[in-house]
Image: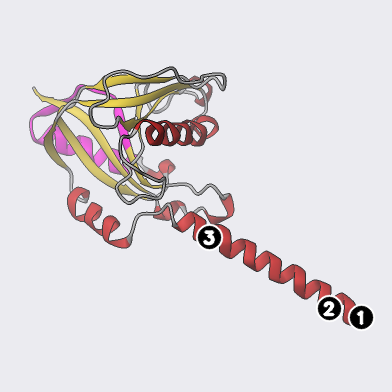
């Protein structure tokens, strides 16, 4: 009996340590509370601003975003790190937030969903070296057109974005603008690499559309 209790105690200790290790590892990829607070202040209300065109590292996929998203973003992180002229780690606080553009309507069937996963390219990058695409994920260097854009912050799960999107669209209409570009998202706080640590209520996503005056 005593031996059994010792074994159970060891197993419980290992489980607790493993949970703490994964939690701390996950938190190392999370923005600091001050960053999230700044996002709420900057993007909490719908607004229209001018953004410069951007050079982006892009991976395009067709199919369920939940199947491709993690793989595509991780590959972009690795490529960005390899191409950057500065020493940078994936936990660096200055690491750019990943983004995605969704050219097709949001009610498109998941198996037909088109995602353009992206990271801003390192400064000064004009062409890509050869990058292994044996995994089926091809990295491209593409200029994303911007100009006037409408933006708003969504806090919560991706499935609950519709009211936030509608609020942004209503604001665009009230300002005499119309949408001219695809749905774009910038992911500041999202799913964990460890599903048991996921908290969709804490996802922070900036939603963005290119717009123009009617």
Other-residue count near label 1 (Cα within 10 Å), few / some / many at <14 / 14–19 / ≥20: few
- Contact, mark 3 vs mark 2 (Cβ under 8 Å): no
Residue at the spot x=41%, y=42% of the render?
A: 158
Pick the quarter of the image with the C terminus.
top left
Q: In which quarter of the image is residue 22?
A: bottom right
Q: Residue 1 carries which label?
A: 1
Residue 38: % across, % down: 22, 56
Numbered circle sitting on residue 23: 3
Residue 194 is situated, as x and y percent measured from the top left of the image, at 57, 50
The residue sitting at 29% across, 56% down in the picture is 36
User: Is 184 within the magenta?
Assistant: yes
Q: Is mark 2 on a helix, strand or loop?
A: helix
Residue 173 percent location from the top left of the image = 14, 32
Q: Using residue 122 as the reference point, say whether residue 201 is left or right of it.
A: right
**135 or 110: nearer the viewer:** 135
Contact? badges 2 and 1 (CB < 8 Å): yes
- Which one is earlier in the sequence, the residue at label 3 or at label 1? 1
Q: Which mark is residue 5?
A: 2
Residue 165 part of the magenta-drawn span: yes
Residue at 23 percent across and 43 percent down: it is 152
Residue 109 percent location from the top left of the image: 49, 24
Quadrant location of the N terminus? Answer: bottom right
Figure check: 102 above or below 203: above
**Label 3 vs label 2: CA separation?**
27 Å
Query: Looking at the rendering, which quadrant does residue 136 occupy?
Result: top right
Q: In which quarter of the image is residue 130?
A: top left
In this picture, residue 31 sits left or right of residue 111:
left
Cα gap from disc 2 to disc 1, whole angstroms = 6 Å
Which stretch did the figure color magenta? 162-185
Identify the residue at image location x=49%, y=55%: 26
Marks 3 & 1, CB-CB < 8 Å contact: no
């Amino acid at each position: 009996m005593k031996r059994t209790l010792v074994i159970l105690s060891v197993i419980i200790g290992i489980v607790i340590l493993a949970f703490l290790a994964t939690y701390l590892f996950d938190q190392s990829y999370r923005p600091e509370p001050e960053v999230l607070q700044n996002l709420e202040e900057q993007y909490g209300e719908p607004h229209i601003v001018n953004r410069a065109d951007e050079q982006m590292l892009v991976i395009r996929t067709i199919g369920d975003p939940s199947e491709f998203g993690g793989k595509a973003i991780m590959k972009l992180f690795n490529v960005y790190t390899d191409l950057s002229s500065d020493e940078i780690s994936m936990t660096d606080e200055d690491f750019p937030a990943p983004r995605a553009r969704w050219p097709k309507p949001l009610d498109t069937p998941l198996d037909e969903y088109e995602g353009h996963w992206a990271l801003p390219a390192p400064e000064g990058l004009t062409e890509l070296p050869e990058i292994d695409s044996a995994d089926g994920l091809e990295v491209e260097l593409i200029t994303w057109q911007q100009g006037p854009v409408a933006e708003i912050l969504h806090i919560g799960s991706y499935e609950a974005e519709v009211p936030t999107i509608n609020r942004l669209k209503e604001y665009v209409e009230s300002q005499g603008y119309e949408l001219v570009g695809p749905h774009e998202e910038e992911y500041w706080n999202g799913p964990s690499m460890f599903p048991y640590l996921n908290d969709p209520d804490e996802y922070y996503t900036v939603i963005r559309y290119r717009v123009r005056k009617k």
